Image: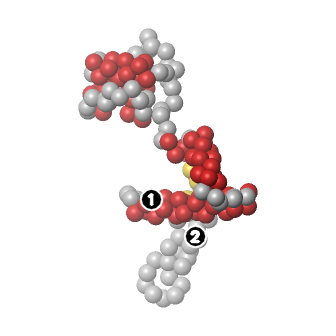
């Protein structure tokens, strides 16, 4: 779907009142098929069967684009070469691994700070259709140390 087509869709959804019905406000008419446009469009398709139900994927953030990240890495290596640094494959690998570890640490810290609910220590992974992979939980949750407190799901 082109930007103009998405813009026309957003205008039509706003004009028909669908955006107000779903979101309580108008869609931003920016030509980007983002999550809000996707939500209103899918709701509309569920309620109006005269329109085909094929919808494009919502726009993804730039950092999810492997092509863009690869291009940025190539530019950085090119700039380093122009500055007189000779990088071999080993050095590039070390830089990428270090940068990945740094980004992962920042993301996990920010995610922890913005967390809205408690953490389930037994949940390992969510699977489709409501199936979850969980760690085993001790069935006897008694206070073994005599401290008077609940030892938690792992017994400590």
Q: Can residue 15 be seen here?
A: yes
**In terms of secondary structure, where does tag 2 sit?**
loop
Disc marking residue 28 = none
Q: Is residue 87 left or right of residue 106?
A: right
Pick the front one: 77 or 106: 77
- What x and y, as percent, mark residue 83? 60, 57
Q: Residues within 10 Å of mark 2 (few under 14, many from 20)?
A: few
* Residues marked 2 and 1 touching at CB (< 8 Å): no
Pick the front one: 150 or 139: 150
Q: Residue at x 61, y 63 (%)?
A: 98
Q: Residue at x 73, y 57 (%)?
A: 89
Rendered view: 82 above or below 35: below
Q: Which residue is mark 2?
A: 139
- Gap in angstroms between the C-alphas marked 2 and 1: 31 Å
- What x and y, as percent, mark residue 150? 46, 77
Q: Which residue is mark 1?
A: 111
- What x and y, as percent, mark residue 61? 48, 41
| Labels 2 and 1: the sequence-earlier one | 1
Q: Can residue 135 be seen here?
A: no
Q: Residues within 10 Å of mark 1 (few under 14, many from 20)?
A: few
- What x and y, as percent, mark residue 126? 56, 50
Pick the front one: 91 or 4: 91
Q: Quadrant of residue 117?
A: bottom left
**In terms of secondary structure, where does tag 1 sit?**
helix
Q: Is residue 148 left or right of residue 97?
A: left
Q: Is residue 145 left or right of residue 42?
A: right
Q: Residue at x 48, y 32 (%)?
A: 58
């Amino acid at each position: 779907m082109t930007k103009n087509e998405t813009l026309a869709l957003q205008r039509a959804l706003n004009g028909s009142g669908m955006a107000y019905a779903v979101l309580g406000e108008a869609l931003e008419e920016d030509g980007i098929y983002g999550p809000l446009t996707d939500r209103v469009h899918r709701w509309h398709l569920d309620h109006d069967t005269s329109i085909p139900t094929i919808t494009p994927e919502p726009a993804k953030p730039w950092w999810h684009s492997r092509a863009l990240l690869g291009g940025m890495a190539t530019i950085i290596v090119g700039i380093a070469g122009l500055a007189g640094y000779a990088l071999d494959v080993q050095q590039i690998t070390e830089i990428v691994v270090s940068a990945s570890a740094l980004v992962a640490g920042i993301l996990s810290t920010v995610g922890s700070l913005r967390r809205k609910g408690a953490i389930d220590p037994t949940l390992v992974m969510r699977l489709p259709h409501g199936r979850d992979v969980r760690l085993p939980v001790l069935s006897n949750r008694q206070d073994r140390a005599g401290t008077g407190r609940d030892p938690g799901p792992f017994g400590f």
